[in-house]
């Protein structure tokens, strides 16, 4: 091959080849391990990022659909995650200073043009067509051997990359062509790296899309050039100095900070240092600054191109060369991906279950913020497009050409979560969220469990914060517990604004200037996203009407703003039809609240399509309500009301189940009218009200409603040779037929001995208001002491209905739903798994299997050292979860007693190893509203949970200090105090809203938590 | 495998004998000859049996039969307590049969000492909404009871403390006593189940829509 090349490079043949070399720079030089559609998506995303200024993440594309293979070492019984189980695939390297400039390591990358495969392997990678003797430059040191460095034979094989710097926690490898001296492995005299030849016409691939700024490797007439040998410095020392700066940043900042917030990286190679390959990622425009490729954590026996090491790919040009700070930020981002693969990924049935992309990219971008306290530019895209789905798990979006607003939404939400719920305990909060084995919204809800809130509520506050961005009132006291803004972005300093080139508030989706006649408009909003509709103009009591698509869950917040008043937020109260009204008293010009922002949002997943809504703003102030008489429930009352006076009797047009007519109204007062409607059937309707007030203003309103018709109660007995159903009074309130039939289905189930035939029972409406008795004939003689239950047959196995008794030749029990019913005996006790798995919060899981009547949650008793501990049954996972939080780390023996629903009991002793993470797990006030007293409770987990000092102070709504008390340790890391709803002078406090501020000091850390409660006697 | 089939689905199969029973017919079957106590029994015992039969029929939704029983009882010599009980039952049998206004005179008699009759009467007055006196009367009837002390005697009426509070709230709201109305609707909501869409829940929603409660 060398000889062939030598011949081609000489004479006229060279001219003919120039065109091919140029083509090679733009076409993939070798087949890529990632499929064509993903590569195409990546290239499109790179171009879009270049255009918009967004930050693209190649990891998201590369790690999509990881190979569905068993990961070695993950089949250990009781495996709970990747952490600590994926190591020891290959032996460690553990290079020392003696290996510097000498160690040459093969790397498989997708750094080639168009993200094709590019191998720094000296041709030795198995099965990829390389040839050791011809591709590493060693075989022939002729005049053209430098061609190997530049891959002139276009086979995608380059010499191996060389170890150029060793940090405390990293190795930095650089391909030979990007360093001024040769590695000693190739040249023991450290000759300089061969220069590129201008005649080859090679240019920096990323600059192909830069127009006239295109750079060549070597000087060419009229062309700009950048010699790859000198991109890190013109001599070895200056090049090394650049690498030292990189390694120092990784060792002293990136490595410790990312580990503090997110957890530990994996270790497949038993080498504690992370490999960093500084190479040119040739995406055509230079947008992709780096990547973590999870396949490198798999053994080569499973994925031949795995590098079998913890490896970060960082872009040398243009990123590291022109924006080293961006290269460091990217390293932080990719290192978080690596950590997340270890901490947040789990194996389900032998394959990896990945986190939803929106949450993982929230972590990685938040890692960038943790690194240098600056925001990603993706936040700007979200600010411009707030109607962007936050909970976006679809790969089609993340692999699409412009996911930058999604990235921005994910980042901003993670930032909000960390600031509002992490607080001073931020690293703990984030680490727990990363480690949670659930994914997506469930994972966030798990992290919020101790805060008495849910993703749905947090999202609503988040949506308001993105517009209002205020945490303090005019008097500098806290506004709404700081939830309507970002503390980071204080209102009086523009240097810390949320955003890079844009800044909060997010953009209006629409602005409405009201005339006195009001307005009615329609629009749509996506799931887990929000619209922002500015409302200004005119004045008066403004009636905001909202009606959203019935198939999803809307919230409609109204932000009230004025120049000299603190902002306030109210929600339009929406009925089950997602419709409702809100009256804003004294709105508009000349009033305190002179403008509003309506924020429609959806807090449910849906099908990712925008959902329609209609909103209106009128000053007509006509309220309409439809409801049943509380005693004669088949009679509806319809009330029409205005805050002023009606000039005449309002008119009411009603449509109910497609029938239409006018109803005559009677005055209750001059502002309120009433009429009745007697139901004959259940259904849905609409009332349209029209009226004129004493000022001559025309008032209108429309209300959709649904109504239930209650037929007279019935009772009776239905008998057939194959079964009886006895319906007591009050059990059925829906009209229809009750049908009993001998079932054609006669199945058996493991763990159950069926003792009767199956009976089909169909009830009106498929359910009863009270249980009905079913009697089934026994299929043989059975002892009356037999533990027997009633079950419903289903595709998922027998569904427990309740215990049954044996009376004579019948089995008898209660049901309250339709189904294929049978009675069966269960004589097999549950089986308790032999091992317990503890998580970092002290929750210990023990598997319990029962194939018959199922585990009876009420039978579970767990004792630790003779003391009963709290435990719950998680039916979905088939596990008992015992709460050992607050205990010191160590090994605990648990005595477990459990029965199935028919009383078959089992006992076992199981050991659990606790290695808890100290932290706060809960701060709550209950009950709320409180009537006679309130309990204040704060709890901690981990070994130091028993030594905390706690104090609680209570403030009223105006911020006045009402009462304070220390909290007493009740065991298990739980601290409590009881408030008798009295102030410091012992007098009962008045009804209203109060704030409880917990202050805790433990293990050298302090916590301050605030909770809202109400007193209502 | 069949899990949840509607009656029609099973009927269409026609595989096996199917027994259909319209539940409304049960009471008629049961009552054939059921209330014949024969002659010679003491009058008070006969009257009490008629009252008991009346309530049993209210329970099963046989309001016309119940009405007949109560009317027969009223025609018998009665103790004071039986008289109240008979008129209370008659009021409910008539009003539950969609003749609410006709029930008012019967409730008026029984409301002297029957909590259930007071509730039935107040609900009927609100339903009538003839004059503002109707609302004041309803508010007084219930406010003086008061709803906290209400104890239902007959399960078939499906009355509850929450519903009585809601009725009281309506009466006060219509009578122009907003603070009392608010107090009672909050008590109704607190006493009601956590279910969405119950009668009390819908009235609670209506109070918010109408601006009678925050």
Image (cartoon, coloured by chain):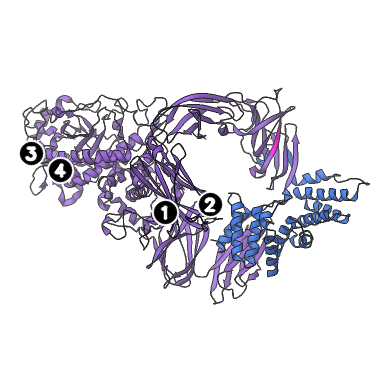
Q: Which circle's residue, 1 or 4, is located before the other in the chain? A: 4
- Asked if the residues shown at circle 4 and circle 2 are in contact, with their CB atoms under 8 angstroms apart, the answer is no
- What is the residue that sits farthest to the right in this orientation? B40
Are discs 1 and 2 both within one chain?
A: yes
Where is A469 relative to A921, above or below?
A: below
Residue count near mark 1 (Cα–Cα under 10 Å), binned few <14, some 14–19, many ≥20: some
Camera-side residue: A328 or A707?
A: A328
Residue at mark 1: A461
Residue at mark 2: A930
Residue count near mark 4 (Cα–Cα under 10 Å), binned few <14, some 14–19, many ≥20: many
Q: Which circle's residue, 3 or 4, is located before the other in the chain? A: 4
Task: Indicate left or right for A583 with A473 as reference.
Answer: right
Are discs 1 and 3 both within one chain?
A: yes
Residue at mark 4: A203
Camera-side residue: A605 or A238?
A: A238
Which chain is home to disc 1? A
Residue at mark 3: A235
Give the SS element for disc 3: loop
């Amino acid at each position: 091959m060398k000889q062939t090349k030598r011949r081609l490079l000489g004479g006229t043949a060279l001219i003919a080849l120039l065109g091919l070399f140029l083509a090679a720079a733009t076409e993939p030089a070798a087949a890529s391990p990632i499929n064509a559609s993903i590569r195409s998506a990546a290239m499109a995303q790179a171009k879009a990022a270049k255009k918009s200024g967004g930050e693209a993440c190649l990891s998201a594309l590369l790690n999509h659909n990881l190979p569905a293979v068993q990961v070695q070492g993950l089949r250990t019984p009781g495996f709970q995650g990747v952490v600590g189980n994926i190591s020891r695939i290959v032996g460690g390297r553990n290079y020392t200073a003696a290996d510097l400039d000498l160690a040459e390591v093969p790397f498989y990358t997708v750094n080639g043009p168009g993200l094709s495969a590019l191998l720094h392997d000296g041709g030795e990678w198995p099965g990829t067509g390389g040839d050791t003797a011809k591709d590493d430059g060693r075989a022939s040191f002729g005049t053209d051997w430098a061609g190997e460095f530049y891959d002139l034979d276009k086979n995608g094989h380059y010499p191996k990359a060389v170890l150029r710097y060793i940090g405390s926690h990293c190795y930095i490898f650089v391909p030979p062509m990007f360093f001024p001296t040769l590695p000693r492995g190739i040249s023991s005299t450290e000759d300089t790296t061969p220069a590129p030849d201008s005649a080859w016409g090679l240019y920096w691939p990323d600059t192909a899309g830069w127009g006239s700024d295109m750079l060549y490797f070597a000087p060419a007439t009229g062309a700009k050039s950048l010699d790859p040998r000198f991109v890190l410095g013109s001599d070895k020392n200056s090049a090394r100095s650049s690498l030292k700066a990189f390694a120092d940043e990784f060792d002293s900042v990136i490595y410790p900070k990312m580990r503090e917030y997110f957890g530990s990286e994996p270790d497949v190679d038993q080498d504690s240092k992370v490999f960093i390959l500084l190479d040119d990622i040739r995406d055509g425009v230079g947008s992709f600054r780096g990547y973590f490729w999870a396949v490198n954590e798999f053994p080569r026996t499973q994925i031949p191109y795995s590098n079998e090491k913890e490896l970060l790919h960082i872009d040398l040009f243009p990123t590291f060369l022109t924006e080293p700070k961006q290269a460091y930020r990217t390293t932080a981002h990719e290192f978080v991906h690596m950590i997340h693969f270890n901490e947040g990924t789990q194996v389900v049935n032998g394959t990896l279950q990945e986190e939803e992309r929106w949450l993982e990219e929230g972590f990685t971008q938040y890692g960038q913020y943790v690194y240098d306290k600056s925001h990603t530019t993706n936040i700007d895209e979200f600010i411009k497009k707030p109607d962007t789905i936050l909970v976006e798990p679809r790969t089609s979006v993340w692999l699409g050409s412009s996911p930058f607003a999604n990235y921005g939404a994910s980042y901003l939400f993670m930032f909000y979560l960390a600031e509002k719920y992490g607080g001073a305990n931020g690293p703990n909060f984030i680490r727990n969220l990363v480690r949670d084995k659930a994914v997506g919204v469930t994972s966030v809800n798990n992290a919020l469990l101790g805060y008495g809130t849910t993703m749905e509520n947090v999202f609503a506050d988040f949506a308001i914060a993105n517009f209002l961005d205020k945490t303090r009132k005019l008097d500098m006291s806290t506004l709404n517990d700081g939830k309507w803004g970002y503390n980071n972005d204080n209102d009086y300093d523009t240097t810390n604004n949320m955003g890079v080139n844009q800044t909060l508030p997010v953009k209006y989706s629409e602005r409405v200037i009201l005339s006195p006649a009001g307005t009615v408009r329609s629009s749509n909003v996506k799931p887990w996203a929000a619209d922002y509709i500015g409302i200004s103009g005119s004045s008066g009591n403004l009636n905001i009407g909202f009606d959203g698509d019935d198939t999803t869950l809307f919230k409609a917040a109204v932000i009230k703003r004025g120049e000299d008043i603190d902002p306030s937020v109210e929600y339009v109260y929406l009925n089950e039809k997602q419709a409702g009204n809100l009256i804003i008293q004294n709105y508009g010009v000349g009033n305190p609240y002179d403008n509003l922002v309506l924020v429609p949002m959806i807090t449910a997943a849906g099908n990712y399509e925008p959902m329609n809504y209609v909103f209106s703003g009128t000053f007509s102030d006509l309220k309409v309500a439809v409801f049943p008489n509380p005693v004669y429930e088949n009679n509806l009352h319809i009330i029409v009301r205005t805050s002023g006076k009606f000039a005449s009797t309002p008119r009411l047009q009603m449509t109910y189940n497609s029938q239409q007519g006018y109803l005559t109204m009677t005055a209750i007062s001059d502002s309120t009218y009433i009429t009745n409607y007697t139901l004959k059937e259940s259904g849905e309707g609409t009332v349209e009200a029209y009226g004129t007030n004493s000022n001559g203003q025309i008032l209108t309103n429309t209300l959709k409603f649904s109504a239930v018709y209650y037929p007279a109660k019935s009772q009776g007995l239905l008998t057939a040779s194959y079964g009886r159903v006895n319906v007591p009074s009050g059990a059925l309130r829906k009209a229809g037929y009750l049908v009993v039939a001998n079932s054609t289905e006669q199945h058996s189930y493991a763990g159950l001995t069926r003792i009767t035939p199956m009976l089909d029972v169909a009830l009106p409406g498929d359910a009863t208001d009270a249980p009905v008795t079913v009697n089934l004939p026994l299929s043989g003689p059975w002892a009356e002491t037999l533990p027997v239950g009633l079950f419903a047959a289903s595709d998922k196995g027998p569904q427990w209905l309740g215990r049954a008794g044996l009376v004579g030749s019948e089995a008898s029990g209660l049901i309250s739903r339709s189904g294929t019913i049978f009675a069966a005996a269960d004589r097999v006790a549950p089986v308790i798994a032999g091992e317990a798995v503890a998580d970092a919060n002290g929750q210990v899981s023990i598997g319990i299997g029962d194939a018959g009547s199922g585990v009876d949650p009420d039978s579970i008793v767990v004792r630790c050292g003779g003391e009963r501990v709290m435990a719950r049954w998680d039916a979905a996972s088939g596990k008992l979860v015992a709460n050992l939080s607050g205990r010191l780390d160590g090994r605990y023996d648990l005595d477990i007693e459990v029965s199935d629903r028919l009383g078959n009991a089992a006992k076992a002793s199981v050991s659990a190893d606790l290695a808890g993470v100290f932290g706060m797990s809960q701060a709550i006030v209950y009950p709320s509203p409180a009537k006679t007293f309130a309990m204040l409770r704060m709890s901690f987990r981990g070994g130091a949970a028993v030594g905390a000092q706690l104090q609680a102070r209570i403030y009223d709504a105006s911020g006045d200090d009402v009462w304070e008390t220390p909290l007493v340790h009740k065991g298990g890391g739980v601290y409590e105090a009881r408030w008798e709803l009295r102030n410091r002078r012992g007098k009962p406090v008045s009804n209203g809203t109060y704030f409880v501020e917990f202050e805790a000091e433990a293990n050298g850390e302090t916590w301050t938590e605030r909770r809202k409660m109400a007193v209502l006697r | 495998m069949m899990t949840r089939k509607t009656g029609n689905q099973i009927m269409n199969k026609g595989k096996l004998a199917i027994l259909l029973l319209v539940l409304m017919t049960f009471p008629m079957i049961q009552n054939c000859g059921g209330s014949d106590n024969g002659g010679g029994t003491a009058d008070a015992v006969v009257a009490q049996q008629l009252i008991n039969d009346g309530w049993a029929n209210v329970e099963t939704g046989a309001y016309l039969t119940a009405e007949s029983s109560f009317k027969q009882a009223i025609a018998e010599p009665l103790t004071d307590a039986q008289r109240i009980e008979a008129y209370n039952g008659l009021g409910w049998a008539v009003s539950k049969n969609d003749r609410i206004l006709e029930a008012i005179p019967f409730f008026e008699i029984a409301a002297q000492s029957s909590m259930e009759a007071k509730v039935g009467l107040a609900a009927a007055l609100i339903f009538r909404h003839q004059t503002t006196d109707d609302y004041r009367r309803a508010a007084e009837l219930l406010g003086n009871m008061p709803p906290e002390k209400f104890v239902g005697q007959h399960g078939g009426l499906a009355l509850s403390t929450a519903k009585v509070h809601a009725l009281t709230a309506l009466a006060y709201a219509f009578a122009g006593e907003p603070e009392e109305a608010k107090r009672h609707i909050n008590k109704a909501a607190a006493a009601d189940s956590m279910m969405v869409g119950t009668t009390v829940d819908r009235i609670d929603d209506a109070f918010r829509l109408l601006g009678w409660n925050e």
